[in-house]
Image (tube, coloured by chain):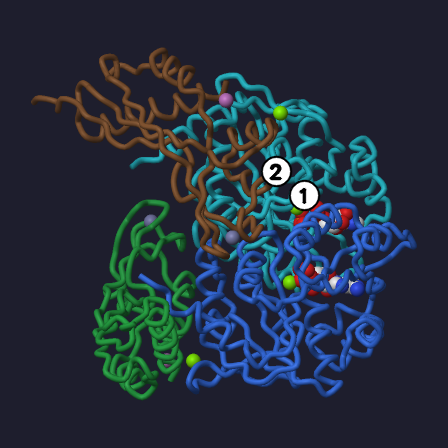
Chain colours: A brown, B green, C blue, D cyan
Amino acid sequence: MHEWALAEAVIKTASQIAEKEGLDNVSEVNIRLGELQQVDIEIFKFALSQLKAPKLEKAQFNIRRDEAKLRCRVCSYEWTFSSVELDEEAREAVHFVPEIAHAFMKCPQCGSPDFEVVSGRGVWIESVKGVKRHG
Amino acid sequence: MHEWALAEAVIKTASQIAEKEGLDNVSEVNIRLGELQQVDIEIFKFALSQLKAPKLEKAQFNIRRDEAKLRCRVCSYEWTFSSVELDEEAREAVHFVPEIAHAFMKCPQCGSPDFEVVSGRGVWIESVKGVKRHG
Amino acid sequence: MVDPRIPLISERLREIRRVIAVSSGKGGVGKSLVASVLALTLAKKGYKVGFFDTDFTSPSSHIILGVSNIQPEEMNGIVPPTVHGLKYMSIIYYAGDRASPLRGAEFSNALIELLAVTVWGELDFLIIDMPPGISDATLDVLRLIKKAEFLVVTTSSRLAFETVRKFIDLLLELNVPVLGVIENMKMTNSDFIRKETEEKGIKFWGEIPFDKNLEESIGDVERLLNIEFGKALERMIGEKIDLN
Amino acid sequence: MVDPRIPLISERLREIRRVIAVSSGKGGVGKSLVASVLALTLAKKGYKVGFFDTDFTSPSSHIILGVSNIQPEEMNGIVPPTVHGLKYMSIIYYAGDRASPLRGAEFSNALIELLAVTVWGELDFLIIDMPPGISDATLDVLRLIKKAEFLVVTTSSRLAFETVRKFIDLLLELNVPVLGVIENMKMTNSDFIRKETEEKGIKFWGEIPFDKNLEESIGDVERLLNIEFGKALERMIGEKIDLN
Ligand SMILES: Nc1ncnc2c1ncn2[C@@H]1O[C@H](COP(=O)(O)OP(=O)(O)O)[C@@H](O)[C@H]1O
Ligand SMILES: Nc1ncnc2c1ncn2[C@@H]1O[C@H](COP(=O)(O)OP(=O)(O)O)[C@@H](O)[C@H]1O
Ligand SMILES: [Mg+2]
Ligand SMILES: [Mg+2]
Ligand SMILES: [Mg+2]
Ligand SMILES: [Mg+2]
Ligand code: NI
Ligand code: NI
Ligand SMILES: [Zn+2]
Ligand SMILES: [Zn+2]
């Protein structure tokens, strides 16, 4: 489950942000999870809870799903990832490297592989909130 | 003066936008002119006035200068183009192909040529306003 | 915010009859040499020819043509200078011999800029020398130059053809015209490339032998046209391009 | 919005002693062959070696290594399978033999993703096979892998060295370690490349002759190591890399 690696990235980065912003105790970490990567949210949450770093012990992880939207650079057509049928092999490939979508998907209107992932690509940290260090 | 070519691009595109939006008479075209390209604004304005297409006869061209800001992708340092000393040859090259800045400029903090032009690259049309076609 | 350059591009290319992108996906197979000699040969036959080197981070056609110290003219845009009978456009006019490290998005922006401001005028052929990779340059030519036809260069090596095969499949899937495949630097007599090409329903233009006289002819266009390389390509052009 | 992958990358590379990026700027000079044989040779000498093919739009190292039907394992990330003694990572695990047309920004995103999730563990060497061009791959390796050292491959041709020269100048200006320059596919006895290299204060690693047995050895690593190509590179590695 490489969901653990993604969770590790979030924990490490949230800790760094807390450090930089002088937060002693992090109360919440707001995460945006792109649909394209098809992250298993239960495993991801479990990994976050297991990996908790010192300052993140009491942190709540709020996860917002971000719909994957695609736009063709040739004909400007827009569509959603959920409207596309992909076989298991393709889904798994996109799960690991979302850009591989360009090997498996085409614009439904003009057939071009030259499309943009407008939203919902990967994992992002929206914000880290907590109590400022005193002193 | 390749300012004429840039003006031609604006006229042609503004006409297309007017057409698409069903505008009979365009009253204003709002243009953003990036500092990086060092466009000669007098020549550019003159070219716009000479090139006027049918629907643009009464149009007013509002030109807003956009300061060129750069940000290093390596160290995140930000600086402005106006703070950089460049010789005549470099300025001229950047005038024609703004991306050539990467051959002549470096991040003042870390020396990398891997910087982003955050704003003020080229010529953009912000909006085209006018009277809708009746009927 | 609308980029006003895009609508201007088709206008700039309006008076060009045919656009040929010399491409491959693979690097070092001879794209720049084929593109240069193709352009020179067509010009010699009396056609009006433009030549655009789009390999902005590693241009080499100026070395092949032996060009230096020329600049385009500014006249309602940029008018490419004529070099050995070709209207020749290259990033070297602006970058000189400096490295121009450009990310893909920057490459793309530079390509759009040059397509929008370059005044080619009336041409029979515009030959485009493409960079390697299946990336921004390929996608932008497909997106912006609807009339582009692709001439694909490969060597006999499995390493080259592995990429060339993918490149061709992409073009075919998009219904883009593929003029043909050239097998360059041929040293053995395997017919692997010919077979693979014809199986895909594409014209095999033929083979250009590995030419020991090529290196010393670089920069001297008269010699380039007269060595085996130039002669082989000239024969193919005569046979394979419909020049009516 | 912060991309959480970036801070993880240095963590992933922490237990790697040395990272060698086999690069050039120019395509088709033999980067993939040099990178593959360099990795194999170091592994044979008993070092722990990882090998990462970053030429996502035109990968070829899997053909050189004769690899197929392998997949990485998922274990707190992606654990590359071991192939001929190398921990081997390539986009082919995900793209198969399909074309993956990626723009620069997409390439960059895929590279960051793989650097963030690949679990290399402890390595003496990570060898990186680089794509051609002076673009996203080069800039990202410079930006993300601070300990990368560059081994530069060129041919004897002026066309190759025109780009290689720019590539080296960029590295030197950035004070990035350049391990050396290899002159590959040598057929004449000019010492142009050696001189140019040494004038820049860079180690000239030596010449690899054009090897007629190379093509038929592709896919067979034992043969690759035993033909002239492999032997020449092995000698250079013994002499030029400080292997303490
Ligand atoms: N037919 C040939 N015979 C000998 N050398 C060749 C031949 N074609 C190309 N070359 C050499 O191969 C190298 C790559 O050629 P180039 O045109 O730069 O390829 P690309 O543009 O595909 O990178 C150059 O050094 C060139 O001199
Ligand atoms: N020393 C050599 N002798 C003969 N052929 C070579 C030699 N080195 C490389 N080649 C051939 O040159 C081509 C390019 O090699 P490759 O490793 O794919 O280069 P790159 O990764 O720089 O594009 C391949 O067809 C390869 O077989
Ligand atoms: Mg699988
Ligand atoms: Mg000048
Ligand atoms: Mg080339
Ligand atoms: Mg390679
Ligand atoms: Ni997973
Ligand atoms: Ni001008
Ligand atoms: Zn489309
Ligand atoms: Zn910097």
Mark 1 residue crowding within 10 angstroms, few (<14) / some (14–19) / many (20+): many
The dot on residue D32 is 1
Q: CA distance from mark 2 to mark 1?
A: 8 Å
Q: Quadrant of residue A56?
A: top left
The chain letter under disc 1 is D
Q: Which residue is mark 2?
A: D53
Classify residue D198 as left or right of residue B94: right
Looking at the rendered structure, the secondary structure element under dot 1 is helix
- Residue C2 vertical position relative to residue A96 in the rendered view, above or below: below
Classify residue C134 as left or right of residue C237: left
Q: Residue C213 versus residue C199: which sits nearer the camera?
A: C199
Looking at the rendered structure, the secondary structure element under dot 2 is strand
Q: Residue D224 versus residue D104: which sits nearer the camera?
A: D104
Query: Does the closest atom of ligand 6 sit within 8 Å of the Cβ of label 1?
Result: yes
Q: How many labels sit on residues?
A: 2
The dot on residue C83 is none
Amino acid under disc 1? Ser
Q: Given contact means CB atoms under 8 Å apart, are the residues at marks 2 and 1 in contact?
A: yes
- Residue D233 vertical position relative to residue D40 in the rendered view, above or below: below
Amino acid under disc 2? Asp
Q: Quadrant of the N terminus of chain D?
A: top left
- Residue A52 image offset from top left, x and y in percent: 31, 14
Query: Does the closest atom of ligand 6 sit within 8 Å of the Cβ of label 2?
Result: no
Extreme residue toward the front, this view: B135
